[in-house]
Amino acid sequence: MDMSFSPEDQAFRAEVRQFLRDRLPARLSEKELTKPEIEEWHAVLNEKGWLAGNWPVQFGGAGWTAIQRHIFEEESALAHAPRVLPFGIAMLGPVLQKFGSKEQQDHYLPRILNGQDWWCQGYSEPGAGSDLASLKTTAVRDGDHYIVNGQKTWTTLGQHANWIFCLVRTDSTVKAQEGISFLLIDMTAPGIIVRPIVLLDGTPEVNEVFFDDVRVPVENLVGEENRGWTYAKYLLTHERTNIAGVGFATAGLAALKRIARAQVANGRPLIENPLFAARLAQVEIDLMAMSTTNLRLLAQAAAGQVPGAESSMLKLKGTQIRQAINDLTRRAVGPWALAFPSEALEGANDDAPPGPAEAAGATRAYLNNRKLSIYGGSNEIQRGIIAKSLLGL
């Protein structure tokens, strides 16, 4: 695949590979990481200046081109490096750089890079998921503070966060989208309660967050009051492009091919089975097409264009491809893909789980990634956006 890249880009790929060989500890790859371990890898990348490849140099980022970002994400996934958490780097950072005040930029952006702040996202609510504009969490002005009341849900890794960026309703007398504001809230403030939600794979990855008369300084408002929907849409285009997960899909496909070569069906490697090979080939073709589209959108973003319905296309196809890879991997390991006890999955004992080494991982990935077609705006909603924006339906 390198033949399509310039000599400079191929040299950058070689640099990334060498960096990952030298600086990525084996204990941080191919496992569920603790908060300190995630912070450790973030610190390694920040020291190198590579934590925020999507940020301009003026804000402390790497200022990479679209192709360099693509290369880094792909090589990191292939090396099983921990993913860079998107909430501060890929979501809030771009919003603050475009809409935040100089004071907010100077205060929060360095803290994202140096690990002082761990951010989570306060968008979805029990009655406002894909229909996000119907959110009911309120922020009422009281002097130099807002008083926030309500509930957010599906807050990923909120149990680790010390800050949350939230969409709140500041005006209920206008059209739903016109009465929303974007607030930065200290998770240690009195009145905030975080409760875990256990997912299909047995992990408490997401949470409910409750706000009971939480006082938030007015200076924590990003941009203008009641203009939060504009900032939310800007953030969502970045989130949906990120959800496509081209790097993760590339790494998952490579692992799937290894498994299919090792697993034997009817006396022959599974990869030689015509039906399985055809499904594998279709996924690889789809991934190549999506990778090209992803590069095009990244280049547009680097040129100052804001992705529109194209990011919905990428999110839609990207999640379908990743789920297809998870499904084929689960099928490849056969009966060993049956769910194992949580103790074995989590490595809580010294006995290795039965079957191929990749079996437990296949089950966990398949179960966990059922969420991909729902979060970040369900795939049904993305189809509606595409139909309205591109087809005029």
Image (cartoon, rainbow, N blue to C red):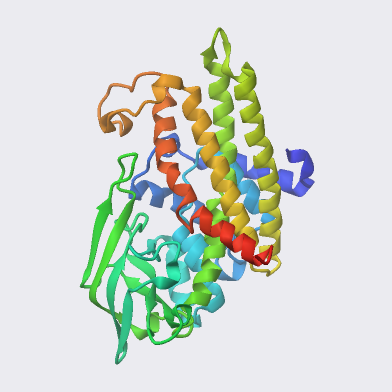
Residue 241, image quadrant: bottom right
Residue 129 seen in the figure: yes
Q: Residue furthest bottom?
A: 143
Q: Position of residue 7 (x, y in %)?
A: 78, 45
Residue 18, image quadrant: top right
Q: Position of residue 335 (x, y in %)?
A: 41, 20
The front one of 359 and 108 is 359
Residue 52 seen in the figure: no
Q: Residue at x 37, y 83 (%)?
A: 170
> Image height check: is 285 above or below 193?
above
Q: Position of residue 271 (x, y in %)?
A: 61, 20
Q: Residue at x 35, y 67 (%)?
A: 163
Q: Left or right: where does residue 274 sit relative to residue 120?
A: right
The front one of 280 and 72 is 280
Q: Residue furthest top?
A: 267
Quadrant where the C terminus sits is bottom right
Q: Residue at x 50, y 35 (%)?
A: 326
Q: Position of residue 376 (x, y in %)?
A: 48, 58
Quadrant where the N terminus sits is top right
> Image height check: is 22 above or below 300?
above
Q: How many marks?
A: 0
Q: Residue at x 70, y 44 (%)?
A: 289
> Image height check: is 128 above or below 295?
below
Q: Residue furthest front?
A: 393
